[in-house]
Every structure is written in structure tokens, then in C-alpha cells.
């Protein structure tokens, strides 16, 4: 029975072939208008292009975060200068202009630390946290 079914008359239209004479209604310019980039072959509007208006992705402000990496030798240098006494936290690093207020801190294990410090940061490498604990200090995650 299914092989006898056919679409209703008038529902299927033949594909209109463009540029095949003026009598078809789509001859000459083939429905693309006169001249200009849009009438040419190979034209494609760039993604996000809004006709010269400042596009949305450029109107919206940038956002994100930075992770500032601080090594143990830099911390020891701060201790030697007398800028850090018993603890190291975000406020001390901001005051000494090492990081900005919005920055995240990660302590890395290059160098050695000799003084026992209470260090608070967002992340610690395994080597850094073990070195701090060996020197008698403590590690606090923010």
C-alpha cells in the first residue's frame, strides 16, 4: 500500500533555476540586485558583523582573572629585606606592589625558605607546601 502513496498535487514545486532568461522572473541579476559585494560570488558576511556598528563582543567589557606565581626565593627575599615578619598574606603583597587586589596567588617551590612563616594563598605547589612545612611554617588556602 505504501508504494502507491504519492504527494498531494501542488505540494511539490520544481526548483527555480536562476539566470535562465528574463521570462522566468529570476534572469539577469538572479534576485541579487545590482552591483555591490552582496551580488558577487564568494561573498559572505563576517560572523559578528553588524553593518559597521560596534559589535556586541567589543561593546561588552573584558573579564577573567590572573594567577600570579610567586616562588619561595622571592618570599625569602622579602623576609631578608624586613618587609615580611611572621605571616605573608594578600594584604602584604598588595602593599609591596607584588600583586593587584583582584589577582590570585600561587606559591611555587623554586628556591628555599629558611624562616617559619604563616603563608596564605589561593594555590600551592606540592614542593612549595612541603618546603614551607619543613621550615616550621604553615600553609593556609584562601
Image (spheres, grey):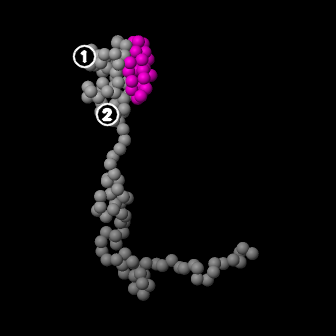
Instruction: Locate the C terminus by quadrant.
Output: top left
Highlighted magenta segment, given as a residue range: 118-142
Would residue 124 be found to the left or right of residue 35 on screen? right
Q: Position of residue 104 (x, y in %)?
A: 36, 32
Q: Is residue 30 visible?
A: yes
State the residue position of label 1: 81
**Residue 114 position by quadrant:** top left
Q: Residue at x 35, y 66 (%)?
A: 43
Q: Residues within 10 Å of mark 1 (few under 14, many from 20)?
A: few
Q: Position of residue 68 (x, y in %)?
A: 34, 31
Q: Is residue 112 visible?
A: no
Marks 2 and 1 sit apart, C-alpha to C-alpha, by 23 Å
In the picture shown, does residue 38 fall above or below 81? below
Residue 91 belongs to the span the image colors magenta: no
Q: Residue at x 37, y 64 (%)?
A: 44
**Residue 34 position by quadrant:** bottom left
Q: Position of residue 60 (x, y in %)?
A: 34, 51
SS at mark 2? loop
User: Which one is in front, 11 or 22?
Assistant: 11
Q: Nearer the viewer, mark 2 or mark 1?
A: 2
State the residue position of label 2: 101
Question: Earlier along the polypeptide chain: callout 2 or callout 1?
Answer: 1
User: Which one is in front, 118 or 11?
Assistant: 118
Amino acid at each position: 500500500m505504501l508504494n502507491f502513496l504519492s504527494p498531494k498535487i501542488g505540494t511539490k514545486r520544481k526548483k527555480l533555476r536562476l539566470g535562465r532568461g528574463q521570462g522566468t522572473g529570476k534572469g539577469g541579476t538572479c534576485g541579487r540586485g545590482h552591483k555591490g559585494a552582496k551580488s558577487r560570488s564568494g561573498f559572505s558576511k563576517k560572523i559578528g558583523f553588524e553593518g559597521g556598528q560596534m559589535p556586541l563582543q567589543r561593546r561588552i567589557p573584558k573579564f577573567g582573572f590572573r594567577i600570579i606565581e610567586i616562588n619561595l626565593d622571592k618570599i625569602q627575599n622579602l623576609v631578608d629585606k624586613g618587609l615580611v615578619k611572621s605571616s605573608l598574606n594578600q594584604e602584604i603583597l598588595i602593599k609591596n606592589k607584588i600583586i593587584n587586589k583582584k589577582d590570585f596567588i600561587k606559591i611555587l617551590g623554586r628556591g628555599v625558605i629558611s624562616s617559619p612563616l604563616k603563608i596564605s594563598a589561593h594555590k600551592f605547589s606540592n614542593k612549595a607546601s612541603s618546603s614551607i612545612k619543613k621550615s616550621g611554617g604553615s600553609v593556609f588556602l584562601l
